[in-house]
Amino acid sequence: MKGIVGKKLGMTQLFDAETGEVTPVTVIEAGPCPIVRVKTVDSDGYEAVQLAFDPVAERKVTKARLGQLGEAGAHRKLVEFRGTTELTPGEAVTVETFEPGDRIKISGIGIGKGFAGTIKRHNFHRGPVSHGSHNIRKPGSIGASATPARVFKGVKMAGRMGGKRVTQVGLTVHEVDPQRNLLLVKGAVPGPKNGYVEVREDTGRGRA
């Protein structure tokens, strides 16, 4: 299992002087992430690893979370990755776990767009803009009146857009900087700047 927790710092581009190719990359500050707990089939029914990230003062963490973190100390994030590992609690996962060319998938909380109408939120078409039209950016019919005399659940309407967990698959590690704990990922990554992200190896067998 290859996995690490990090913070999205932003995007930039790298220029290759030999080929002249410009590559857009996302810079992620990842790790070091101390291993808090290793779950096994015998003890928990499944295999997983819990990693901590972003150390903070103890006063900023609840007593319950402090007890869960144990010897790792106070950290802001605690993330569980399914899979096996040869590491033990107390050791740390660093960006050196990954190599340039590794296929990965990254999960994070997408940027919240606030309240949005159906055109922006669900890609609805607008109505006619001709003279007398009152249906330019309205959602249109949301159901019949007499039968069933109610609106079914799941009808696409206006509401809060974004701010949900998103997993971007098909990404590639472009470069690794162990000295500064940086991962340079080719392409865009979900979430705002300074948002937390989870980096996993992409085996193509499932989605996070």
Image (cartoon, helix red, strand yellow):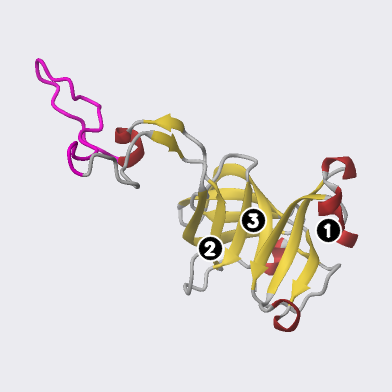
Label located before the other in sequence (1 or 3): 1
Residue 128 is left or right of residue 25, and the answer is left
The mark found on residue 190 in the picture is none
* Residue 67 highlighted magenta (yes or no): no
Q: Position of residue 31 (x, y in %)?
A: 74, 56
Q: Residue at x 47, y 72 (%)?
A: 204
Mark 1: amino acid:
Leu
The CA distance from mark 2 to mark 1 is: 23 Å
- Magenta-tinted stretch: 123-147
Instruction: Quickly name the residue at label 2.
Output: 208
Mark 2: amino acid:
Ala
The answer to whether 75 is drawn above or below residue 193 in the figure is below
Q: Residue at x 20, y 24 (%)?
A: 136
Q: Residue at x 65, y 41 (%)?
A: 194
User: Which secondary structure dominates the residues rendered in magenta?
Assistant: loop
Q: Position of residue 92 (x, y in %)?
A: 80, 65
The CA distance from mark 2 to mark 3 is: 20 Å
Residue 116 is left or right of residue 181, and the answer is left
User: Mark 3 Cα within 10 Å, few/some/many (few <14, many 20+)?
Assistant: many
The mark found on residue 69 in the picture is 1
Instruction: Quickly name the residue at label 3.
Output: 183
